[in-house]
């Protein structure tokens, strides 16, 4: 499997501000995804980060709130904009295309607390 | 969209006994079914997966079975050990590598010594 890192690992932010989370993989991958895991809950897909084009968002998530970039095959960013306490969650990136086509591996996550 | 139901939400078993967690899904086009284990404060770790052209897959003490007709799949853990205690998530994908996963709500597995 690939080595996946995320920065920052955690942060505490004030409401109304924005935070950009980085996801770096040590090898080229075909697909990258962003998920949210609220405290004690399951994982929910936010969007697919497409290399060289706009991300594909799931129902309930919009680009203005969660802009995503993927400039190359090893890196992606997720920005959480105009944050509110309801955005407090763990944000995880995942990658696909290491080994078999469908298998997804997760980064360590970014724990975000919004005050 | 896809809907994934997972049961039970909590499962307590004696060490050495077997544990079974079940998931059902709604979209008959789904064809990729992974299971993840998540320990407290850690990332989800893939433990086993199965694709729709296979009915059963086994890896040491862990097995997954799939019934595509009934749209359900199950995780079986035999000879449970204390280190099996964690939250287990089933997930469903469309296969082909183009889409993300839809997750079940998770099962908190507790292994009693």
Image: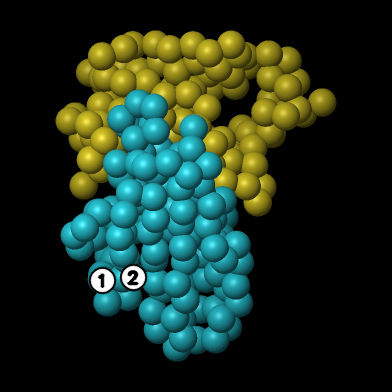
**Label 2 lies in what chain?**
A
Spot the yellow chain and give its letter: B
Whether marks 2 and 1 lie on the same chain? yes
Q: Residue at x 26, y 14 (%)?
A: B53
Q: Residues within 10 Å of mark 1 (few under 14, many from 20)?
A: some
Q: Residue at x 62, y 47 (%)?
A: B42
**Where B81 falls versus A42 (above or below)?**
above
- Give percent across and percent down for residue B77: 58, 19
- Give percent across and percent down for residue B92: 33, 35
Q: Residue at x 64, y 37 (%)?
A: B86
Q: Secondary structure at mark 2?
A: loop
In the image: residue B7, left or right of residue A71:
right
Q: Residues within 10 Å of mark 2 (few under 14, many from 20)?
A: many
Q: Residue at x 25, y 31 (%)?
A: B95
Disc 1 designates what residue?
A63
- Extreme residue toward the right, this view: B113
Disc 2 designates what residue?
A66
**Label 1 lies in what chain?**
A
Q: Quadrant of residue B74?
A: top left
In the image: residue B39, left or right of residue B55:
right
Give the alpha-carbon distance from disc 2 to disc 1, as whole Å.
Answer: 5 Å
- Give percent across and percent down for residue B57: 43, 12
Q: What tint does the image give chain A? A: cyan
| Whether residue B65 can be seen here | yes
Closer to the camera in the image, A69 or B35: A69
Q: Are marks 2 and 1 in contact (CB under 8 Å)?
A: yes
| Whether residue B2 can be seen here | no
């Amino acid at each position: 499997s690939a080595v996946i890192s995320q920065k920052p690992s955690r942060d505490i932010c004030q409401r109304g501000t924005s935070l950009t989370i980085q996801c770096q993989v040590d090898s080229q991958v075909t697909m990258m995804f962003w998920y949210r895991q609220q405290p004690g809950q399951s994982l929910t897909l936010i969007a697919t980060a497409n290399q060289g084009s706009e991300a594909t968002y799931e129902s309930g998530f919009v680009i203005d709130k969660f802009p995503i970039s993927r400039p190359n095959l090893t890196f992606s960013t997720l920005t959480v904009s105009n944050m509110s306490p309801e955005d407090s969650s763990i944000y995880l990136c995942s990658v696909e295309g290491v080994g078999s086509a469908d298998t997804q591996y997760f980064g360590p996550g970014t724990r975000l607390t919004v005050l | 969209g896809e809907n994934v139901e997972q049961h039970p939400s909590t499962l307590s078993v004696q060490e050495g006994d077997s544990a079974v967690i079940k998931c059902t899904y709604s979209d008959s086009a789904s064809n990729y079914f992974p299971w993840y284990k998540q320990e407290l404060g850690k990332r989800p770790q893939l433990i086993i997966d199965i694709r729709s052209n296979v009915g059963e897959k086994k890896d040491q003490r862990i097995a997954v079975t799939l019934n595509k007709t009934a749209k359900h799949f199950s995780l079986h853990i035999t000879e449970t050990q204390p280190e099996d205690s964690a939250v287990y998530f089933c997930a469903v994908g469309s296969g082909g590598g183009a889409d993300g996963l839809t997750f079940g709500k998770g099962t908190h597995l507790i292994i009693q010594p």
